[in-house]
Amino acid sequence: MKDEKELRVIQAAKTVFLRYGFRRVTMQDVADEAAISRPALYLIYPNKEEIFKAAARQIAGESIAAIREGLSRFPTIEGKLNFAFDVWTVRTYELMLNAPDAKDVIDCTHGFARQTIEEIDAEFKKLLLEILAPLKSRSYKSIVPLPQVAHLLAASAHGYKESATGVAELRTMIAGLIKLTLTALQAKQTKAS
């Protein structure tokens, strides 16, 4: 369990990384935003890379919790998937659009934070698999196992963030991916019945 000071640091980190990007942020920036001294910050985190990873885990945890909390509002698998991707992918995309200096934050996901990001992605894929699980109970048979379907959905949506020209296009691309995937899966089920 994180203490109050550590939570303040993580919140401060989210703010300054979005404001300035990763490269420009210093430990002093984080300390100032968290209203603690730099030596006190070093007692909590040894460097900004560790702060970044902690902030990424916190953001992911909040997003997963928001998705889980909201899923019951959607009666269909398609609605649940669209909601999950809206929280997980579209909101992140919007943050990056509104903070142009923070675009280098994405670069961190390919470098020192790769393992953390892979762990976070695994949690999201696990959630997608839970959403897709009712397909299995409907005597689902496919040449593509549901864990692979979850992986394909997550990886494709991640790639869509790179090519989308705006939020509306990103939502349209993701909705199309979900509809195409579910249509293919349901067609396979119908043939198997």
Image (spheres, grey):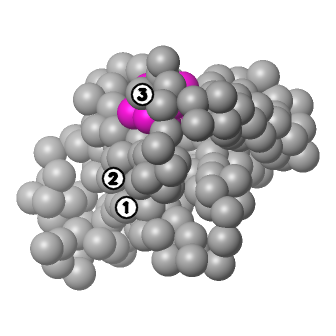
Q: Which residue is mark 3?
A: 145
What type of secondary structure mainly makes up the magenta span? helix
Q: Is residue 163 left or right of residue 62?
A: right
Residue 192: which quarter of the image?
top right
Q: Which residue is mark 2?
A: 57
Q: Amino acid at mark 3?
A: Pro
| Mark 3, other Cα within 10 Å: few <14 / some 14–19 / many ≥20 | few
Q: Give the SS element for disc 2.
A: helix
Residue 152: which quarter of the image?
top right
Residue 173 in percent (x, y) is at 81, 34
Q: Give the SS element for disc 3.
A: loop
Q: Is residue 41 left or right of residue 182?
A: left
The range drawn in magenta is: 146-153
| Mark 2, other Cα within 10 Å: few <14 / some 14–19 / many ≥20 | some
* Quadrant where the image shows the C terminus: top right
190 and 33: which one is in front?
190
Tell me what residue is drawn at x 23 percent, y 69 percent: 6
Tell me what residue is drawn at x 29 percent, y 38 percent: 119
Q: Nearer the viewer, mark 3 or mark 2?
A: 3
Q: Nearer the viewer, mark 1 or mark 3?
A: 3
Q: Nearer the viewer, mark 1 or mark 2?
A: 1
Tell me what residue is drawn at x 50 percent, y 50 percent: 138
Q: Which residue is mark 1?
A: 61
- Measure the C-alpha gap from mark 1 to mark 3: 26 Å
- Asked if the residues shown at circle 1 and circle 2 are in contact, with their CB atoms under 8 angstroms apart, the answer is yes
